[in-house]
Image (cartoon, rainbow, N blue to C red):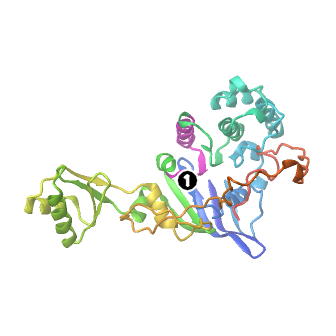
Amino acid sequence: MIEAYGLTKRYGPHTAVEQLTFQVRPGIVTGFLGPNGSGKSTTMRMILGLDEPTSGTVTIGGHPYRRLPNAGRTVGALLDAKAVHGGRSAHSHLLSLAQLAGIPRQRVDEVLDIVGLQDVARRRTGDFSLGMGQRLGIAGALLGDPEVLLFDEPVNGLDPEGILWVRNLMKGLAAEGRTVFVSSHLMSEMALTADHLVVIGQGRLLADMSVREFLDRHSTGFARVRTPDGAGEQRQLLAKVLAEAGARTDPEPDGALRVAGLPLPRISDLAHQHAVRLYELSPHQASLEEAYMRLTQGEVAYRSGASAAGPAGSPWGAPPMSYPGPVPGPAADPLRAPEDPAAAPRAEAAPAPDAVPHPCGTAPGGFGESEV
């Protein structure tokens, strides 16, 4: 079990994490959600002893990470799949980690088989694709057969088959009674994988509850109502009647009505009383993404200059959403002659530092940049 109490981290005047208190229990998959810059990576680094809290405590099995007798066999973590020496093979990388943690050599072959990299075990990791690198990072996390596992964006770069494999892996590890803590921005995948959610925004705790409770609290159910095709007058009549009864109605792109605020039996009764034929009357629950956006809309640290509007007449009441993105540069002038590349000064690349394996599976400081 992971337990955080009053966890706070400040960098000078900036507070990255503020008074976080939560538990990650064994036997379930706990999703860790929050916008970019909310403090997720900083929190994970404090759990793993890579950053020292300004105040508060975080323990694994009742002990700070640095005081665990054999951390490599107790905790497995993937925070940055790129923290691998590109000149080493996958087998050599995992073998060095195993030797540091006192893990038997045969375990290297076992985890390579688990993640599906046995056929490329002798290839240089610098030639790996993004998805292959993610699989190697997961192998490093599984190396010590740990009871506690932390994953930051584990499906990044994976194809659909790989995403399904990771989902089943997480659920399987939790079913064995292990503690599984997963950070991700893919709400659709979290909805299928996680049993419990810890949501933070701007370093503060926003929610700590089951996925079902989260959806019930932060989303609004609605009904889809469809009248016969071509019966525009009936659809307009029904929308007027439902609005007078206190419902909110919004047109769908396919001609149906999205109705919120009335139960299905009441909608059916009103349609029957006014002789409106219904071809569809079905209940719907808002998605995890919609519930998440509704909760965190005021906690986003980085926004683009132009907002991207959300669905028209959104039933969950969120304003038009904006997403972080690169700032476009000036458009190129097609009539202007290109500059001579020889005339432009060239910067020399700094030599890469030597990579030294970390007992937890990455290079020192290579668990990912803190979201500050």
- Which residue shows up at 84% across the image and 49% down it? 341
Question: Which of these two is toward me, 284 or 9?
Answer: 284
Q: Quadrant of residue 146?
A: top right
Q: Residue furthest bottom?
A: 13
Q: Residue furthest front?
A: 335
Q: Is residue 353 left or right of residue 82?
A: right
Q: Quadrant of residue 204?
A: bottom right
Circle 1 sits in a helix, a strand or a loop, which is it?
A: strand
Q: Quadrant of residue 35?
A: bottom right
Question: Which of these two is toward me, 267 or 142?
Answer: 267
Q: Position of residue 115 (x, y in %)?
A: 64, 32
Q: Is residue 165 left or right of residue 238?
A: right
Range drawn in magenta? 162-187
Question: Which of these two is toward me, 34 or 160?
Answer: 160
Residue 91 painted magenta: no
State the quadrant of the C terminus: bottom right
In the image, residue 360 sits, relative to residue 32, either above or below, namely: above
In the image, residue 328 sits, relative to residue 88, either above or below, namely: below
Q: Is residue 259 left or right of residue 22?
A: left
Q: Position of residue 214 (x, y in %)?
A: 45, 60
Q: Position of residue 271 (x, y in %)?
A: 13, 60
| Residue 113 in view of the camera | yes
- Residue type at numbered disc 1: Gly
Query: Where does label 1 land, which residue?
Result: 31
In the image, residue 235 sits, relative to residue 152, either above or below, namely: below
Q: Position of residue 121 (x, y in %)?
A: 74, 27
Question: Which of these two is toward me, 320 or 91?
Answer: 320
Residue 177 painted magenta: yes
